[in-house]
Amino acid sequence: MNKKLVTMLAAGAAVSMLFSVNALADEIKVWVADNVVDFTNEQIDAFKEANPDFADFDYVVEAVGEGDAAGNMITDVEAGADIYCFAQDQIARLVAAGALEEVAPDNVEAVENDNDAGAVGAATVGDILYAYPITSDNGYFLYYDKSVVTDPTSLEAIIADCEAAGKNFYMEINSGWYQTAFFFATGAELSYETDDTGAFTACNASYASEEGLLALKKMIELKASSSFQNGSAVGEATNCAAIVDGTWDAEAAKDLMGDNYACAKLPTFTAANGETYQMSGFGGFKLLGVKPQEDEAKLEACDALASFLSSGDVQLARFEAVGWGPSNLEAQQSDAVKADEALSALAEQLVYTIPQGQYPGDYWSLSTSLGDSIISKELTPDTSDDDLMAALQKFQDTCEGYVG
């Protein structure tokens, strides 16, 4: 081949590669759930208008939900989005994978002051804030029929009202998500630590304790009620006067209970030791992350956009558009959000919850087995404390065995 032609082709390839690199540098890819793609595009237009210094970037919004975003980012950080929405239980894995930039120092104070404590905690690893909270709306609380339940603040009162009316109380006690409402309430602990590869390195567990025994006994006592039904889906509930469920079932609960529809945080319960405990559990939050960038100008634009999309005004607009519950304190106090009874009840409950971290897959099936042993009456109110503690010890030992 002609030497001059080879040189020209090589130069052309170099120019093409340069254009390709520049195109990537000028593109900011954003991953959000499908139902907020249009909303996000509208907000980016508003962002560019308000921030002309960042208007020259090519913003590309793609439908990748928070359930898939973290896995995709960890698989290939370089090919992943520059800004992406993810569930809070994935944050440790994302930090370990180098897929999250720390929140820009100029934005930290605003994020910490403007959002509720649970959301800020969920966005923090160690002492470092790694993400921008955008929702506080994943958790569970109480839906109830106010013509039947006269005191939603007490589990014992709720059960008594349901029994007297011949109505059902629903809670899914064979679920590792819902069970924690009892165990975390009494002070029992179950959490995991991971290393930089995402492997589980430690299990902090105290279910095999007096605190755990109190929680287990209360679950057994609940199961013994004639009103109790195991479940957490309004659509599958029958003759229901109260159910522990989430915001995703709000419309179904309204349809079921009609004019008697009401919501509240989870109740307290009185344990076998005579002490009263506030039911707790897991809380869930959606966070917005920024991928580390080599180009400082692009990183500045990403931080500015993430800050904008997580601002109180945009959180409130997102609530009005698709119903996502804001983490921003001012947005939570808006008339529109406060008028949403389910979100208001959840916001009150999230104060008492623990952000859900990472748990081994086997933990969830193990928790189902623990709950099933109550439902099947393998564990009953007549089971001795020694046998109950043995069941808890076996559960805890198995949880600890998932490490290493």
Image (spheres, rainbow, N blue to C red):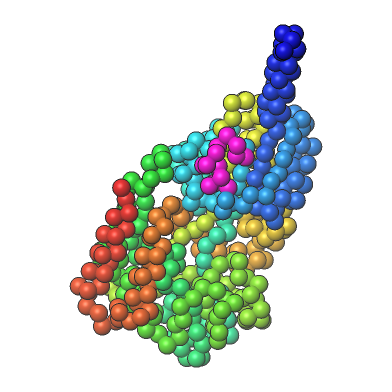
Q: Residue 54: image x %, image y %?
A: 73, 31
Which quarter of the figure has residue 107?
top right
Residue at far top of view = 3
Q: Residue 46: image x %, image y %?
A: 77, 42
In which quadrant of the rendered image does the N terminus lie? top right
Residue at far left of view = 386
- The answer to whether residue 266 of the structure is visible from this angle is yes
Question: Residue drawn 55% across and 42% down?
Answer: 73
Question: Residue drawn 51% across and 73% down?
Answer: 232
Lateral position of residue 300 relative to residue 156, left or right: right
Q: Residue 219: image x %, image y %?
A: 37, 75
Residues in magenta, as a range: 69-81
**Is residue 254 on the magenta stretch?**
no
Asked if residue 226 is positioned above or below residue 254 in the image, the reply reads: below
Which quarter of the figure has residue 388?
bottom left
Please name whichever residue, 57 or 264, is drawn nearer the observer in this view of the structure. Answer: 57
Lateral position of residue 219 relative to residue 14, left or right: left
Question: Residue drawn 75% across and 51% down?
Answer: 38
Question: Residue drawn 45% across and 39% down?
Answer: 96
Q: Residue 77: image x %, image y %?
A: 55, 37
